Image (cartoon, coloured by chain):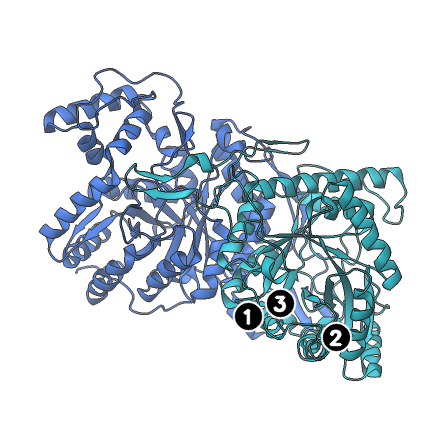
Chain colours: A blue, B cyan
Amino acid sequence: MPRTPKQIHLAAHFPGVNNTTVWSDPQSGSHIEFSSFAHLAQTAERAKFDFLFLAEGLRLREQGGEIYDLDVVGRPDTFTVLAALAAVTDRLGLAGTINSTFNEPYEVARQFASLDHLSGGRAAWNVVTSWDAFTGENFRRGGYLPQDQRYERARTFLAAAGQLFDSWDGTEVVADRAAGQFLRDPGAGTFAHHDAQFSIGGRFSVPRSPQGRPVIFQAGDSDEGREFAAASADAIFSRHSQLRDGQAFYTDVKRRLARYGRRPDQLLILPAATFVLAGTDAEAQELAREVRFQQVSGQTAIKFAEQLWNRDLSGLDPDGPLPDFDPEPGENTIARGRASVRMYRDPVAIARQWRDKAEAGKLSLRELIIEVTGRQSFVGSPATVAATINEFVQADASDGFILVPHITPGGLDEFAGTVVPLLQERGVFRTEYTGRTLREHLGLAPLAGRPAAARAAS
Amino acid sequence: MSRPSPLHLAVALDGAGWHPAAWREPLAQPADLLTPGYWAGLAAEAERGLLDFVTIEDSLGLQSSRRLEPDRRTDQVRGRLDAALIAARIAPLTSRIGLIPAVTATHTEPFHVSKAIATLDYVSGGRAGLRVQVSARPDEAALFGRRTMPRICVTGRDDPAVRRLAAGLFGEAADYVEVVRRLWDSWEDDAEIRDRATGRFIDRRKLHYIDFVGEHFSVKGPSITPRPPQGQPVVAALAHGTEACRLVARSADVGFVTPRDAGQARDIVAEVRREQAAAGRAGETVHLVADLVVFLADDAAAAVARRARLDDLAGYPYTADAAVFAGTPAQLADLLQDWQASGLAGFRLRPAAIPGDLVHITTGLVPELQRRGAFRHQYQASTLRGLLGLPRPVNRYAA
C-alpha cells in the first residue's frame, strides 16, 4: 500500500549579504527598507508558507583588511523587523537568527517571548554560535570564547533560555478585578540556572507566550552541531539541498534522535535552496547560467579564490587558470567575519580538487568558482521544479525547503504564483492555514503547559 | 496678545496605567496587556490626539512596588513585554506619532540597541526614539549574572556610596549613548552606491569604524545597519538628580523632568542649561518636558474621587516621583500653560488609568489646547525630529 505523501514545508529566506543575492539587477530593491521585508513576507503568506527566515551577522565582513564591498552590505536588526512584520502578516511564522555568544539568555528569552506574544505564537529562533574575536570587538565580552566552548555555550544558553520560558506555566495571570488579584502565584516567573557559563536567577518578566517558547532552529553542520540539533532543536536549517547528500544528512540526523528519547517527526530537516524558473526547462537553464554569471563576477571569483588560498590574488586573471601553487597554510587571515572560510578544513586538498576539476572541464577560475559555489538547487519550468521538490521530500532528502530568492524583494513572486499551486494540486502543500501558530504549521505537538486557547477560555 | 508657543505633548504608556490599581478600573483590559491589539489601540488613540510621541516603559526585571528589590505582591500588574519590540509592532500601524521605548543601558549591548533603534526608525519611517535608563537593582544584575550591584538605601542620596554608584551607572549610560550615536553615523547617507561599472555595492570610504574604548565596553563598528532615516533618532532620558541631569545635558535631545510647581520647573531648567553649557552643548536644542501623572474627568470632583477610589483599592495613597494632577482637562490646560512659561518645551503625561485618562487627554485636553491656539490641528511633519523641530543632523564622520 503506498504511504500517504508527506506534506511539504516551505519557508522564505530574505536574500542575504552574500553573492547569491544579485543587487545589480534592475529589479533589485532595497535590502533595508521595511517595504522589502513586508513584500516578501506577504508574498510568502499569500502562498501559505510556513515561515519567513532572517539571517544575522554582527560585524561587516572584511577581506584583505578592508570592508568587503562586492556583495550587499548591511541589514536591519532581526527582532525589530520580525516584530514589525507581525503587524503586516497574520499567520506566517517569523524566524530569526540570534547568536548565543554575543547575547545573554535573559535578554534573548525576553525578546523571543515578547515576539511570540506580539505575533500570536509565530516566533522561531535559529540558534547560532560564534567565537571569533573579530565579531567580539563590537561587544562587551570581546572575543573571549575558545572555539571548543562554542557549543557548550550554545547548549547551556538554550537550556537557560528554556528554563526562563518555562518559568511561567500560563496559569498565573488571573486579573480578577473584583477580588483584586492579578497574579495567582506570588513567586510567578522564579528561575535559577547555574553552570560553567551562566549563573543567573530571579524572576522572568514575560508571562508564558502562546507557543510556550519559540520554535528552535539549529544551523550547524558539524558532528557537534548535529548532536545539538538532535538533542534540542525543532528544525534544522541545513545546507544539503541535493538528493543523495540530503538523504545522507536526513538519515544521519534523524537516527540521532532516539538517543534523546525523541521521535523522527520531532525534528524537521529544512535545507536552504535556490531556484530559477522560466517557461520551459531549456529557458530556465539558460537563465540560470546568466544568473550565475551575475552572482560570480570576475572580481568575486578572485575573492573566492583568495578565501581558499588565504592570500592576495588581486593580480590573477579570472578568465585564466587557477593558481598553480598551494594555499597559505595556517589560520585563515585574509577573510574575516565569513563563516564559509571555516568550512575549508583542508585548503590544500580542496585547491587540488578545484584544479583537477578545472583541468578536466577546461574551466577558467571564474567558471570553476561558478561550478563549485553557484549551482542553483532547482532549475526548470514550474512543473519541473514542483516535481523535483516533491520528489526530494518524498524520498526523505528533506521535510521541505527554505527558499532563497536571488532578487529582493520580488524574487519569490513567480515561485509563489506558479510552483505553489502545482504542489497544492498534488495534495502535498496546504491550500489554507489550518493553525495559528508556527508549531501548528510545522506539525509539532503543543508543549506541555496549558495552550493559549485554554487560558483565554478560563 | 501674542499667541502661546505650541506645546509638545506626549503620553507615557505603562501597562494598565500608572496607578497601581488602574487595572481594576471598569474600562481597563488587564487580561490583554500582553496582546498586540492592546498596544495598537493605545498608539492609534494617541495618534488621533496628534500627540508628538508615546513612550513605552520597561524594566528588565519584573515590576515591583519597591525601588531596588522585587516584591511578592499579587494585587498589581506583573509581567510585561520588551518595549522596543512593542514599538516595532505598532510602527507599521501608525504613520505620524513618535515611538520612544525605554532601554536599560546597564545590562545591554550598545551595538544591539543601536541597530534595533535604527531599525525602528526604518520600520516607522523616521519616528523612532530611545529613552535610556540605568538600573541599580541588585535583582536585575542577577538576571544577567555578569556583575553585582551594591545594596544601597534609596533614601540616602547624599551617602557617598550611593553617589559613587549613581556616577558610575550614569557615566556608563553616557558612554552607551555615545556608542549608539556613533554607530548611527557610522554609515554616511550615500554609502550605498550600487555601482555596476566597478561591481561595488557600497563606497567603503563612507563607512567608519567608531573605535570607542571605554571602561565598560569597547566597540569597533561600523554598525551592520545603515544610517537611519532621521540620521540620529531622538534620545531621551529622565532627569532625576544631578547625575541624570548631566546625562540629559551631555547626551539627550529630550529630557523628562519632574518639577512639583512652576518655580521648581524654572530651577530644573536652569540646572540642565548650566550642565548643557558645561558639556559644550549650549547651542543645541535639548527639549525639557515635564512629567505629570494625570487623573482626568469632566468635573474636578469626579477626578479627585476617582483618585481616592483607586487609592482605596490599592490600599495606600498613590504618590509618584512626578507631580500628580487630578482635575478637568481645562484645569490641566491652565496648569500646562502656566508651567510652560518656566522654559519647558512640553509635557509627558502619565495616564493614571488606561484607557480612561488617555482618552481624556486625546478628546478633552487636546481640543482645549487647540482652542487656545497652543496645540497643532494636524501633523505637520512626518518624522519625530520634525515634530520636535529638531533638524536632521549632519553626520559626524562626513568629510
Give the letter of the chain under mark 1: B
Q: CA distance from mark 3 to mark 1?
A: 9 Å
Crowd rating for badge 1 (residues with CA inside 10 Å; few <14, some 14–19, many 20+): some
Farthest residue to the front: give it.
B1
Where is residue A119 shown, x and y percent of the image? 49, 62
User: What residue is drawn where x is 57% and y is 36%?
Assistant: A139
Q: Is residue A8 visible?
A: no
The type of residue carrying mark 2 is Ala
Q: Disc 1 designates what residue?
A: B37
User: What residue is drawn where x is 62% and y is 75%?
Assistant: B377
The type of residue carrying mark 1 is Gly
Q: Disc 3 designates what residue?
A: B33
Residue B307 relative to residue A61: left or right: right
Q: Disc 2 designates what residue?
A: A179
Q: CA distance from mark 2 to mark 3?
A: 19 Å
Local SS, label 2: loop
Q: Nearer the viewer, residue B346 or B374?
A: B374
Q: Nearer the viewer, residue A269 or A302?
A: A302
* Mark in front: 2 vs 3: 3
Q: Nearer the viewer, residue B383 or A153?
A: B383
Residue A122 relative to residue A159: left or right: left
The quadrant of the picture occupied by the C terminus of chain A is: bottom right
The numbered mark at residue A298 is: none
